[in-house]
Every structure is written in C-alpha cells, then in structure tokens.
Amino acid sequence: MAGLKRITGLRALVYLLLCALSALLLLLAWKNDHLDVANAAIGVACSIVTVIVVDLLWGIAGGAPLETEIKATTERLVLASELLATAQEVGLKRVYGGGRGPSEADLERHRTVTRNVDLCARALRYWTEDASSSRAFLAQVRTNIKRGVQYRLLVYRPYFQPAERERTPFALSSRPAQLGVQNTIEGLAGLLAIRSKLAADDQGKFAVKVCTDFAFSVKISRFDDVMTVAPYVNDAVVQTSPQFVISNIVGAGGLFGFYLEEFEMLFNDSPAPDDELLEAIGGRVADLAKRLN
C-alpha cells in the first residue's frame, strides 16, 4: 500500500496516455496491410506497455531496481576511500578482532626485529605461558640481543595486600584487573626468569619494569617500526578488544608516535622490581627458571 501511494496523479495520467497510444498502435497494426509496419507498431506498443509495467513496479517497490543498493555501495566506496586516506596519514595498517596474543605476525616480527622491542601490558604472561613458549622466547631473545636489539618490558606491579591496592584504586578497580593479579605475577616471574638466563652483560639489554603510579589502558607490542596496539576498551579484556597494526611513517607523526610517547613516559617513570616484590615472587621465578634449563 505504501508503494501504491507513491503513484502520483500525474504519473497515473501519463500511464493512461501511454496506454491509449499503445492501443492506437495496436489498432494501426491490426488495420494495416503492410506486415513490416504492423510489426513495428506492435513492437512499439509492446515497448510502451513494458515501460509502463516496469515503471509501475519500480514505483510500488519504492524506486528504481538496485537504486538503494547502488547508493549504499557508492557511499561505502567513498567512506572506504576516506578511511584509506586517513589510515595512510596516521600509519594505520590494519584493524582486526581481539586476540590474546602474540599473533603469528608479532612472532614473525620478533624473529626479524633488528633494533627495538617494547612490550607493555597488564600482564605479559602469554610470552612465557608454558615451558615451550618460554624456551622459544628465551632463544629468540638471545639471538636478537646478539644483533643489538634492546628490550623494554613493562607490566603492572602485582599487589598482594588490600592496603596496597588502595594506593592505585583506579588501576585495580576493574574486574579484569582484580582477577588478573595471578596472571600479572606469572607474567612478571616469567620475564625475570628469562632475564636470569641471559649472560650478565646482556641482562641490561632486557629491562623489566613495573608500573606503580599510573593506569595504562593499552597493550603495546612494538618491533622496530611496527606496533600492535590493543586498547582495553571500557575495561574489556584484551581478548575482546580491537587491535591495531600501526607503522612508523616518517614525517607523518600519527598513531605510532603517539603510542610510543605514551609507552616511554610510562616506562621512564616506572621502577624496576623492588626488593619486596622480588622476595614475594622469588620462589616462582626460581621455579620458572628451572624449566628453562
């Protein structure tokens, strides 16, 4: 019914006139003795009727066939072009769904990195989650350090007593943060176990710090000039947060520089694990170090 209401009086009048013209052409074809003229008249009459029927159906359907789809597709193409231009300006290479990490792409970047590895998360346990991943990570760290790679790793300081949690109420107010203390301990212990297995001269190239006075809201994995960033959107866990792959585009500034500046501010203002923390997790570090023998 809504489609029929779109058929205006003017259009109906045009339909009647065209129908009358078609009728006259059919009458001409019937009365004409010349076969070619009759066929031509019939063809024109049929074409007019076809146009009327198609136009009527278009009007009932709300417009020309695929008009809405074509318009939507055009708008999507324009938006895609704008997004591509913006992505190039800020260095955004890709956006994909959440993942615990590290991704296969990050593992490959870790194998080919030549200068810098910066890792920042509430917990970095996923790099050393089991014996196999710990050994693989240690082996790659040793290889990378030999070719001059510098590591900077930053995690939250795990708090064990309620009074300590009050020192950073925002950082530990979310449910994922409260439930992630054990993951933070395991991640930190794993990193310290890795460092303990490095040569004495190489341990300084594998810097581990704990964030005590700030609440950072992203997971950062930086390998030279490529960075994977996963914001903890509305305190969502990293598994469900979108992840961005960002490149360092010279002269563009953009997202890479923004997140690198954020990381360096946090890292430079955070201390190394203190004696109290080392004593609290020392047994776990020793246990994890044994499995690397």
Image (cartoon, rainbow, N blue to C red):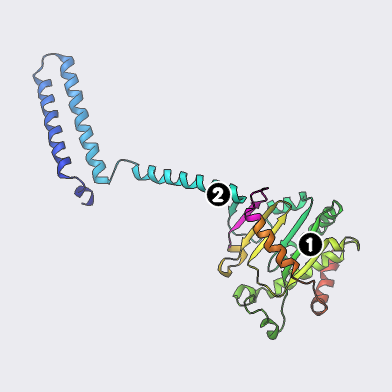
Indicate yes or no whether the magenta region holds residue 224.
no
Residue 20 vertical position relative to residue 10 in the rendered view, above or below: above
Q: Which residues are magenta?
A: 241-256
Reading the image, the residue beneath label 2 is: 86
Residue 177 position in % (x across, y down) = 64, 74
Q: Residue at x 64, y 77 (%)?
A: 172
Measure how far apart labels 2 and 1 are at the Cα level: 39 Å
Looking at the rendered image, the disc whose residue lies closer to the viewer, 2 or 1, is 2
* Residue 101 visible in the current orientation: no
For label 2, count other residues whose C-alpha is less than 10 Å away and answer few (under 14), some (14-19) or many (20+): few
Q: Residue at x 60, y 75 (%)?
A: 175
Indicate yes or no whether the magenta region holds residue 254.
yes
Reading the image, the residue beneath label 1 is: 134
Amino acid tagged 2: Thr
Task: Identify the secondary structure beneath mark 2.
Answer: helix
**Left or right of residue 192: residue 119:** left
Q: Quadrant of residue 185?
A: bottom right
Furthest-bottom residue in this view: 163
Task: Identify the secondary structure beneath mark 1.
Answer: helix
Amino acid tagged 1: Ser
Residue 105 position in % (x across, y down) = 68, 51
Q: What mark, if any, has residue 189 been given in the picture?
A: none
